[in-house]
Amino acid sequence: MGLKTVENPQPDRPYTIAFTFSEFTAVHPVTNEPVFATVTVRYVPGDTCIETVSLKRYLGSYRNQSMSYEASVNRILDDLVAACSPKRMTVAGEFAVRGGIAATVTVDTASDGAANS
């Protein structure tokens, strides 16, 4: 699924864009049952911004994919950084309770050097 971008109207001004996608679903790699999460993307754009409809379709494409919480959140960050080269980005997945445990996985470009802060 291709992520589309649009030109940043203020590339010299640092500002934050935040998206919250409350309908994220994937398949648990051990139980093959669905997992549900809210995925939040916060970033300071570079020259381009992520186009919202393509982001929704991209996140929706995980519905039938089998991967761990950690793998999915890290992959989302990697794909979004590759698409728009932000100055900084954070992706958080807040996964619904399974077996009595809720999980939140957060990854940030500042921790891996994937983008300039």
Image: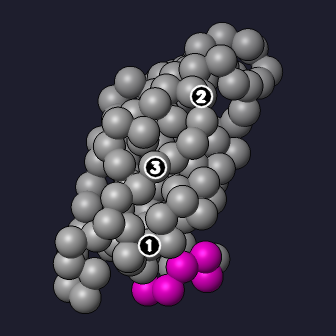
Mark 2 residue crowding within 10 angstroms, few (<14) / some (14–19) / many (20+): some
Q: Are marks 3 and 2 in contact (CB under 8 Å)?
A: no
Q: Amino acid at mark 1?
A: Pro
Q: Which residue is mark 3?
A: 4
The single residue placed furthest to the front in the displayed view is 7
Name the side, left or right, on which 107 lies relative to 40.
right
The foreground one among 68 and 77 is: 77
Residue 26 located within the stretch drawn in magenta: no
Residue 20's place in the image compared with 64, above or below, is below
Among the two numbered marks 3 and 2 on one chain, the one whose residue lies closer to the N terminus: 3
- Helix or strand or loop: what does disc 3 sit on? loop
Calculate the distance from the C-alpha at mark 3 to the C-alpha at mark 2. 17 Å
The foreground one among 91 and 46 is: 46
Residue 114 located within the stretch drawn in magenta: yes
Mark 1 residue crowding within 10 angstroms, few (<14) / some (14–19) / many (20+): many
Residue 62's place in the image compared with 47, above or below, is above
The foreground one among 84 and 94 is: 84
Q: Position of residue 72 (x, y in %)?
A: 63, 42
Among the two numbered marks 1 and 2 on one chain, the one whose residue lies closer to the N terminus: 2
Residue 17's place in the image compared with 105, above or below, is below
Q: Is residue 14 visible?
A: no
Q: Amino acid at mark 3?
A: Lys
Q: Which residue is mark 1?
A: 86
Q: Position of residue 63 (x, y in %)?
A: 58, 20
Q: Position of residue 38 (x, y in %)?
A: 39, 34
User: Which quarter shows the C terminus?
Assistant: bottom left
Q: Are marks 3 and 1 in contact (CB under 8 Å)?
A: no
Main SS of the magenta part reads loop
Calculate the distance from the C-alpha at mark 1 to the C-alpha at mark 2. 22 Å
- Helix or strand or loop: what does disc 2 sit on? helix
